Amino acid sequence: MKKFNASIGAIICSLLVFVVLIGLGTWQLKRLQWKTALLTEISTRMEKPPVPLPEKLDNPADWEYRRVTMTGQFDYSHEFLIKPRTLNEQVGYNMIVPFERLSGGSVMVNRGWISDALMSQAARPKGIVQIEGIVQLPRKNYWTPPNDPAKTDWYWADVDAMASAAGIKNIAPVLFTISTKKTGVYPVAGSVELNIPNNHKQYAIFWFAMAFISQFIFLLRFRQAA
């Protein structure tokens, strides 16, 4: 026969561990619901028909991942290369170019991916053009190195720093990413980086499993032979 022999203190500690782990699992489930809703909202925004990008963006977040159009011309005297970016296992850059709008002001445009070998083949449409793309809010993640404008080393699209380097005063606080890919045309457009992982289900399962494993170990520890 086996009997359970644990002190009140040990039981309380075990229950506290169980409650904390269950709480972490529950929190991850709530995060899962929030993240799923966010991704659904982003997908809905990207599927809407394109509309002209307003001249003034009072709340840029309201336009993130919206499909929009702009009319104006590119300023190829300032081309910023964000590195390193890969496409089909080839290392290259994202080419960012200022776009002067007919309505006034400028917007930094991500024209897409290109490598050093393809740089001579880069298309540079002249004159007034209309472009279609998706609005993004450029963000620097924890692992991204800092930009060094003095050395023209760019690792993320800091539109304010780029505008300062190019002497542009009226710059929109967003990044416009070309969304229409054309075969054989460089830079290669159509690359919208969401960078929104959704691993909360796995995390929730892990914490719930740890909660029950902790109780199983507790029972084994204090179960003794009579």
Image (cartoon, helix red, strand yellow):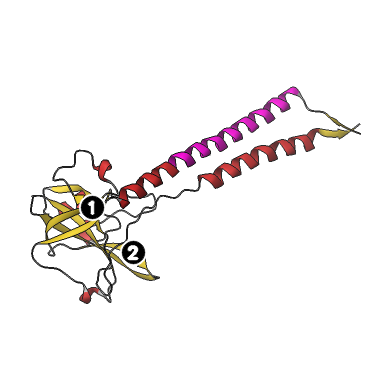
Front-lying residue, 43 or 112? 43
Q: Upstream in the sequence, badge 2 or badge 1?
A: 1
Whole-percent x, y for residue 113 in the image: 29, 66
Q: Dot 1 lies on which element?
A: loop
Vertical side of 180 occupied by 175: above or below: above
Near mark 1 (Cα within 10 A), the count class, few <14, some 14-19 or many ≥20, is some
Q: Amino acid at mark 2?
A: Pro
Seen at 74% across and 35% down, the residue is 218
Position of residue 107 in the picture relative to residue 23 (left or right)? left
**Residue 50, disc:** 1
Position of the C terminus by quadrant: top right
Seen at 31% across and 47% down, the residue is 45
Whole-percent x, y for residue 159 in the image: 21, 51
Q: Is residue 194 magenta?
A: no
CB atoms of marks 2 and 1 within 8 Å: no
Whole-percent x, y for residue 175 in the image: 24, 52
Marks 2 and 1 sit apart, C-alpha to C-alpha, by: 30 Å
Q: Is residue 80 visible?
A: yes
Position of residue 15 in the picture relative to residue 123 (left or right)? right
Seen at 30% across and 49% down, the residue is 65
Q: Dot 2 lies on which element?
A: strand
Vertical side of 130 occupied by 140: above or below: above
User: Mark 2 — residue?
Assistant: 84
Residue 119 quadrant: bottom left
Magenta span covers which residues?
Answer: 8-35
Q: Amino acid at mark 1?
A: Pro
Near mark 2 (Cα within 10 A), the count class, few <14, some 14-19 or many ≥20, is some
Residue furthest top in the image: 8
Front-lying residue, 193 or 167? 193
